[in-house]
Structures are given as C-alpha cells and as structure tokens.
Image: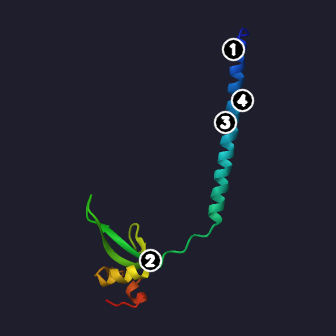
C-alpha cells in the first residue's frame, strides 16, 4: 500500500491481521481437539453386540420393511443394518414365522426349535 493510508484504514488493516492470526490459531486448536477426540475414541473399547438381531428386507420404495430373519447378536450373516431386539422379541418373531439364520441358529440358542 502507499504511504498515504488513512489512520482509519491502517487500523482496519491491523485488525484484519489480528483476526487472521486469531482464526489460524482457532483452526489449530480445532485440529488438535479433533485429533485428541479421535485418539480417545480409538482407545475406548467397542460396545458389545446386542444379544439378538432381526434383519429386514425392503419390498420397494415407500413400502414397509418386512422381517427376514432372526440372528444371534454379532452374526456376520445379518444383512444391511439389522435391528437389535430383546430375547422376548426374538422368540416372538420366530413364533410368528420369521426365519432363523441358518448360520448362527438363534432358534437353538433361544431354546426354540422350528
């Protein structure tokens, strides 16, 4: 800038430099806090899987999901995003004719054989 900068403009330019420095410092704090939170989350053990799951199949856009199979919690064969359910809900689903997973056999684990 030229030497004929008004005092008001000089003050505003100074303020801008201060704010840019403040913003850079705040972004460093945010980055450090994000790293700290990620490290803390990595140290935390994963919650245990639910005891029982029901996997659903969608019939089409705008249609209800239908129960496809009951699984033991943590079953790797449960497709999509299964829903965690209580023991009673799992037993009721099996009693209503929802299939038991052939891999994890929740019907055996629940003491309910098809």
Q: Which residue is mark 2?
A: 75
**Callout 1: few (<14), some (14-19), or many (20+) C-alpha neighbours within 10 Å?**
few
Q: Which residue is mark 1?
A: 1
| Residue lying at the far front of the rendered structure | 88
Which circle, 3 or 2, is nearer the viewer? 3
Q: CA distance from mark 3 to mark 4?
A: 9 Å
Give the answer, above or below, for where 38 lies relative to 89.
Answer: above
Q: Position of residue 59 (x, y in %)?
A: 26, 65
Q: Earlier in the sequence, mark 3 or mark 4?
A: 4
Q: Which residue is mark 3?
A: 23
Q: Earlier in the sequence, mark 4 or mark 1?
A: 1
Q: Earlier in the sequence, mark 1 or mark 2?
A: 1
Q: Are marks 3 and 2 in contact (CB under 8 Å)?
A: no
Give the answer, above or below, for where 25 lies relative to 62.
Answer: above
Q: Earlier in the sequence, mark 4 or mark 2?
A: 4
| Residue lying at the far top of the rendered structure | 4
Labelled disc at residue 65: none
**Callout 2: few (<14), some (14-19), or many (20+) C-alpha neighbours within 10 Å?**
some
Q: Which residue is mark 4?
A: 18
Q: Position of residue 46 (x, y in %)?
A: 57, 70
Q: CA distance from mark 3 to mark 1?
A: 23 Å
Q: CA distance from mark 4 to mark 1?
A: 18 Å
């Amino acid at each position: 800038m030229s030497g004929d900068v008004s005092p008001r403009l000089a003050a505003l330019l100074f303020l801008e430099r201060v704010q840019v420095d403040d913003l850079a410092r705040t972004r460093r704090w945010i980055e450090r806090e994000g790293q700290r939170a990620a490290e803390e989350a990595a140290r935390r053990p994963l919650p245990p899987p639910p005891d029982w799951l029901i996997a659903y199949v969608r019939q089409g856009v705008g249609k209800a999901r239908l129960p496809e199979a009951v699984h033991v919690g943590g079953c790797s064969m449960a497709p999509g995003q299964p829903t965690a359910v209580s023991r009673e809900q799992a037993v009721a689903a099996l009693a209503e004719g929802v299939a038991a997973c052939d891999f994890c056999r929740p019907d055996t684990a629940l003491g309910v054989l098809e």
